[in-house]
Amino acid sequence: MAAAATIQGTMMSSRRKSFWIGTPEIYFSKAIDNSRLVKVEDPRRGREMRQFGIALCCLFLLVMTYAWQHFKAIEYGYQIESLKMQRDSLVEMNRELHLEDASLRNPERIDLMARKLGLQSPQAGQVVRLDVSADSDVPVIASVTPISVISAR
Amino acid sequence: MSLIDEELTLATPRAGTNHRLYILGGLLLLWLCVICMRLVYLQIFRYGDFQQRADHQQQRSITVSAKRGIIFDRQGHELAMSILVDSAFAVPSEVPDLPNAVSLITRITGEDARLVLADCRSRRTFCWVARKANADTIDRIRALNLQGIHFQKESKRFYPKRELAAQVLGYVGTDDGGLSGIEREYDEQLKGQPGRMQISVDARKKWFARIEKEPEAGNNLVLTIDEKIQYIAERELEQAIKDTRAIAGTVIVENPRTGEILALANRPNFNPNVKKEIRNDALKNRAVSDVYEPGSTFKLVTISGALEERLTRPEEVFDCQMGSIVINGMRIRDSKPHGLLTVSDVLAESSDVGAIKIALRLGEDRFYKYIRAFGFGQQTGIELPGETRGLTKPVNRWSKVSIGAISMGQEIGVSPIQLAAMVSTFANDGVWEAPRIVAMTTPPQSMPQTVVFHPEHERRVISALTAAQMRQMMRQVVLHGTGRKAVLEGYSSAGKTGTAQKVDPATGAYSRTKYVGSFAGFAPINNPAVTVAVILDSAVGLHQGGQVAAPVFQRITQQVLEYLHVPHDLQLPTNRQVWLVQNKVKDSDLDESSPDHLGSALEVADVGFTDPAPAAAMQTQKPSAAQGPIAPVALREKELATQAPSTAPSAAANSPEPAKPPANGTVVLDVEQGGIEVPSFIGKSVRSALEAAQDSGLELNPVGSGIAREQSPAAGAHVTAGSRVVVKFGR
């Protein structure tokens, strides 16, 4: 029955909706005096707050350290890349110089230049190798040969 | 109840609305499902297809060639190397006016604008416009500042020594693939792993990304060639080609002990840096792929086979029947009539008749066995592409005249490298070494190192004693035979000349005007350091091997021995001008065997063996006697005194008496003076022979055990200190 009454009430209110303007609201001012209240010191909370602050500082330092090393790593990465490029460039330049050196050492070129200067091929017995009888006390010119083939026999 | 009815009355239209909403929701769900299924179909089942189509439209993957390995000579000098150069490419979708851009670029590069434009129009994302251009060209293209033209580094092959050893090295194509020579044979090791460059284009057709896979450099290669010896060989060959107007020529310099090729020169040749100018005939490496009839140089095989089988001796006398012999009804003539000749003189005078008689004694089967043992009819295994096996026939396919023809170097085809290997066998105490030209491969970033070259394939063909006998006989060829222009200053040398007719392609018969002249020899005699083979094709005018090829051998060998600092084994002439005058030889004196060929139309024999009487009469007129042998008197007398007529062939037995040295006219050259006189070891035990050799300052090479029976060099010969003397011992 209560449910039926509620439904009926609802239906009635819907019928009155057209002229109902709402319940008037009335406000009253009430003074509250809590000046006598005194905040009791809470050492536990204070400790927690300090711990939280320290943790926050640590976290901040960690984040900052991470960010610093991250950006430093990027910076070093750029430097490494730059040095790699420089190294590759130097290696390539070295190869080009080797190529130029090999071209300049072309026996045909040297032979032509020597003949233009009036030099002639040595006759039999005129070829003397200086390194064959080199004395150990006598300084010799150092030379680097990357590869040399010697016969096993 | 009335309220409920009213509520039901109010709820009925709401239920209808909900029903329609359900239908709409269902439709939406169905639509969503269809979309999802379509997405699944497109993104999962058709993923590969669409990805491929997208990649095709948006991306282009370009292979970037890796840096090829360096090719070094044996001293570590670079013969071929690659460096990075710039290439220019276009992204056609980015270029606003493609025809104009291509036209501007091709004006700089000199390439065909239509071809480049057609290539660029057929592709959206990438096309080369200037590949591996030189720095000047790239700078000029860069200066144009064209939109959509980009630059990429690529590896380019350079040959700093230009034409030097061009046929050995070969060359590479635009994509760095080896096309000939070592570059082709060792392409897999040299080329490395290529990298990849990926070019992507966004929706606005902008080139926006490039992902590269770094290429990995290939291995380096170390050759046995020495660039200075190679240059000496090429320079002298070039001079010989100019002097003789030959159409082609080949020179091989080999270390006979190990089979290392120290130089391999060919003419005509090419500059591998200028690919557009390479002619096909210049590409051919004649040293390994040319087949020619060796001519008289093949007599070395004939005579060494007979010596090894103990069927003859160097001092045995053969009747050369005044330079005429009949085989199966065909007459063969020597260029000069020879009477009685020792086996040594048969080789020195290059008598065809003598060689044929020796071959007949050897027999077909044994002769063929030695032909194969010396490496003819099979590849030597040298690391160069296109090596020929030569042309040999098994005995069952020989005609009745084949043994005669082959004994003097006809009816058989050999390559120059086979010839060099055969001559090296005599220099290497009878052991055949496979010629090799690659010492080893090394990693790209290898440290300085020394490569020890070990011979891999070797086999004994003849004994050390036979080899020593052959060396002495070949020495006589140079001293008083057809190879007199091969005499060296301060070094002893040995060799054999050869002249072969060429087949005329027009007639299919042997030409009467085109010859292949050759000389193959080694030096010094007792401790050979190099073997040199020289072949000149179709020399104009003088064409005999002794006239055109022997001087080239002399010039090359002299320089190479001096360069290698091989100690002189002969005293240097005190007065070079006198020495040159003494060694001046008339070209007419160097004529060797007749160009008669058994395969061509030869006259039918009308007589049998030549009467011995005129042979004996001519014996005193033989050229060697008339000119005077240039061997030491003691050696010559010893050789002739030890002739054994009992073992002479039947024809030789008809001669009344063995040949005698001329009463006068013997010339002893300064080059034979000095050195150590070889003592006689005959009759001594191994121990006493070793002691005698040690006392004399010689190195003994004993063969067998018991009492010394034979020795080479013969007693009385003058050799340098430390030379080896081969002594055969028997019981």
Image (cartoon, rainbow, N blue to C red):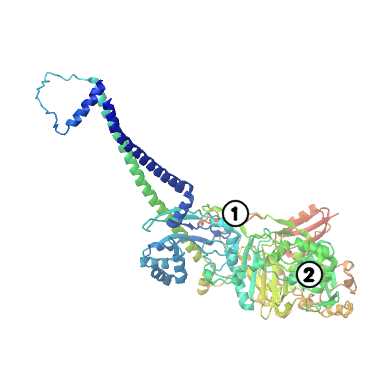
Residue placed under numbered mark 2 in the picture: B406
Name the mark on residue B451: 1
Of residues B277 and B60, which is closer to you in this image?
Answer: B60
Give the image location of residue B393, x and y in percent. Answer: 77, 66
Residue B316 is drawn in which quadrant?
bottom right
Q: Which residue is drawn at 82% across and 70% down?
A: B399
Residue B457 image point, x, y percent:
70, 56
Could you tell me which quadrant the N terminus of chain B lies in?
top left
Who's the residue at 63% across and 75% down the image? Answer: B240
Q: Is residue B544 left or right of residue B182?
A: right
Residue at coordinates 29% horizontally, 28% vertically from top-left? B5
User: Split into 4 quadrants, where in the image is the C terminus of chain B?
Assistant: bottom right
What secondary structure is marked by label 1?
A: strand
Q: Which is more toward the observer, B18 or A4?
A: A4
Whether labels 2 and 1 share one chain: yes
Where does the image place residue B162, in percent across and percent down from the top left?
53, 68
Considering the numbered disc 2 on the image, is that residue within a helix, a strand or a loop? helix
Q: Which amino acid does label 2 sit on?
A: Ile
Which residue is at 79% across, 55% downward?
A: B703
Q: How crowded is mark 2: few (under 14 residues within 10 Å), some or many (20 or more)?
A: many
Crowd class of label 1 (few under 14; some 14 to 19; many from 20; radius 10 Å) = some
Residue B149 visible at all: no
Identify which residue, B687 or B254, lies in the foreground: B254
The one of B519 and B201 positioned closer to us in this rendering: B201
Give the residue type at disc 1. Val
Q: How far apart are marks 2 and 1 (CA)?
A: 41 Å
Q: Within the image, what quadrant is residue B106 found in?
A: bottom left
